[in-house]
Image: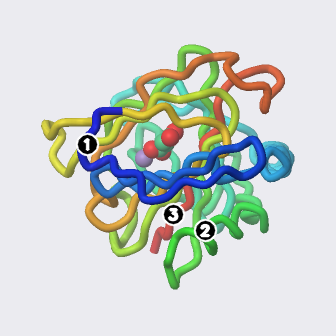
Amino acid sequence: MQPDSGVILSSVADGAVLMARLSVSGFEIHKGYLSADAQARLVKDVRQIVRAAPLVQPITPRGKRMSVQMTAAGRYGWITDRQGYRYATEHPSGTPWPDIPVSIMAIWQALSGSERAPECCLVNFYGEGARMGLHQDKDEASFDWPVLSVSLGDDGLFRMGGTDRSDKTQSIWLQSGDVVVMGGAARRAFHGVDRIRFGSSTVLPKGGRLNLTLRVVT
Ligand code: SIN
Ligand code: MN
């Protein structure tokens, strides 16, 4: 990460795990926020989501297949196909999305500072070689509420910019157990994942990276 606005606000050693809170251009990064037990519980809960609403590898409106696989929990899921990017109340197979697990809601309650509850937990799975291009989250009705992101499994190189695509960017490796809150100015900032370090974590035994993003949709 480039030293810039990336100030360390606080850091504390919790057993062997170092927790630190960084702020980079308005992105609040809670390094090491989740314990190993909490991560294992979340992985178990995500597996339940995936059982009810299987991962799909969607295509963009322009017909390009995304490299990440996706599903969701909550009243809405974010989907993309030839018809466009949007929130939908049903999985592409036609079934409603499962509820957002309590373990995931608890992170929102602890860190979002939001009065509204999330209506979508988007689940992104990055297998070997998967990435996500620089984008803004802008399909929600309001930008007043933050988007909260939870990383599990392999390390992912997270790129953060400003509200213009051409703004300078800074990058940080997100690791399993890290939580990022994108609120305020960062809520409309460009961000993406350049690459993952496949096999860098044992949290997902077959490798890969899971990212959960909690969003208020309506
Ligand atoms: C996203 O922007 O939807 C995903 C971010 C991430 O994978 O860290
Ligand atoms: Mn996003």
| Tag 1 residue | 161
Q: Is residue 4 left or right of residue 176?
A: left
Classify mark 2: residues with Cα within 10 Å, few (<14), some (14-19) or many (20+). Answer: many
Q: Position of residue 149 (x, y in %)?
A: 54, 52
Q: Is residue 175 left or right of residue 44?
A: left
In the picture, the disc for residue 191 is none
Q: State the CA–CA distance, disc 1 to disc 3.
A: 19 Å
Type of residue at label 1?
Gly
Q: Quadrant of the N terminus?
A: top left
Front residue (pair 29, 44): 29
Can you tell which of label 2 and label 3 is closer to the viewer?
Answer: 2
- What's the residue at 80%, 20% (across, down)? 206
- What's the residue at 29%, 33% (across, down)? 2
Front residue (pair 84, 177): 177
Type of residue at label 2?
Trp
In the picture, the disc for residue 108 is 2
Dot 2 and dot 3 residues touching (CB under 8 Å): no
Q: State the CA–CA distance, disc 2 to disc 3.
A: 10 Å
Counting every numbered tag in the picture gives: 3
- What's the residue at 67%, 20% (across, down)? 200
- Ligand 2 is within 8 Å of the C-beta of the residue at disc 3: no
| Tag 3 residue | 215
Q: Secondary structure at mark 1?
A: loop
Q: Which numbered disc, 1 or 3, marks the residue that appears first in the sequence? A: 1
Q: Is residue 127 above or below residue 90?
A: above
Q: Secondary structure at mark 2?
A: helix
Q: Is residue 85 visible?
A: yes
Type of residue at label 3?
Arg
Q: Position of residue 132 (x, y in %)?
A: 44, 31
Q: Is residue 144 above or below residue 86?
A: below
Q: Which numbered disc, 2 or 1, marks the residue that appears first in the sequence? A: 2
Q: Quadrant of residue 26?
A: bottom left
